[in-house]
Amino acid sequence: MLGSVDSIETFGLVDGPGIRTVIFLNGCALRCKYCHNPEMWKLGKMNMSVEEVVAKIKRNRPYFRESGGGVTFSGGEPLMQVDFVIEVSKILKEEGIHVALDTAGVGIGRYEEVLKYIDLVILDIKHLTEDGYQDLVGHDMNEYKKFLEICQKLKKPLWIRQVVVPGVHDNKEYMEMLVDYLKKIQYVERIEFLPYHKLGSEKYERLGIFNPYKDKEPMDEKKCDKLYKKYIAKNFTNKS
């Protein structure tokens, strides 16, 4: 089986616990207005086999053991290549390697099967209302809701990530809605705010893709930190 792999990071420090090998897989059904990797929207060439990816991962096992790390599937959206993720993850679990999935929860199905091999789900929260979600990512919320429901059913540990976009998320109404929403989700181990940035802007120009946030200013990091302290640290313990 072949997968469409954009790149492999061998010393990841932010996509799960410990030192991690991060597999960036091409393909995504969403078109987030703040996406900084538009080059990964399309599936692209099927360029690596399961065996090749596993071999690259196993070279880093000493780092996993020393740091409590492992492997993270990211993207793009790894659930768009769910069969490939399943086959690689089966082998990783046989090897005793920790596996995380960085996802928006919108793929092509087989969620319950793939989650059998996943130790941690890093779940991206886009927006909490149907209209807000549709406007921000160009997709309805049904698939995301289905995926999260299965995560809850299987009691999967969750790290929640919220990109904070100025004028979209950085207001009292949304933040209070987010707090209420997160209180209803079980098995959450960590909550993170990521300030919107413009590091991928030049990619849109290079690829000839319309950038809906071309003129939007980055999120002020200090304001983002204040929002986190006020709404997350205040309401959730041991989640940072």
Image (spheres, rainbow, N blue to C red):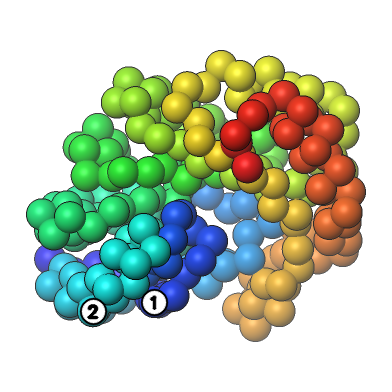
Other-residue count near label 1 (Cα within 10 Å), few / some / many at <14 / 14–19 / ≥20:
some
Residue 56 versus residue 17 in the image, above or below: below
| Residue 190: % across, % down | 56, 39
- Residue 2 lies left or right of residue 125; in this view the side is left
Residue drawn 45% across the image and 55% down it: 17
Residue drawn 57% across the image and 67% down it: 38
Residue 227 versus residue 93 in the image, above or below: above
- Residue 185 lies left or right of residue 166; in this view the side is left
Res. 10 mark: 1
Q: Are marks 2 and 1 in contact (CB under 8 Å)?
A: yes
For the residue marked with disc 1, what is the amino acid?
A: Thr
Q: Image quadrant for the C terminus? A: top right
Res. 127 mark: none
Q: Image quadrant for the N terminus? A: bottom left
Q: Residue furthest front?
A: 66
| Residue 82: % across, % down | 27, 50
CA distance for labels 2 and 1: 9 Å
Residue drawn 40% across the image and 35% down it: 157
Q: Nearer the viewer, residue 91 or 44?
A: 91
Other-residue count near label 2 (Cα within 10 Å), few / some / many at <14 / 14–19 / ≥20:
few
Q: Earlier in the sequence, mark 2 or mark 1?
A: 1
| Secondary structure category for the residue under label 2 | loop
Q: Quadrant of residue 129?
A: top right
Q: Is residue 100 visible?
A: yes
Which residue is disc 2 drawn over?
Answer: 59
Residue 118 versus residue 150 in the image, above or below: below
| Residue 94: % across, % down | 10, 54
For the residue marked with disc 2, what is the amino acid?
A: Arg
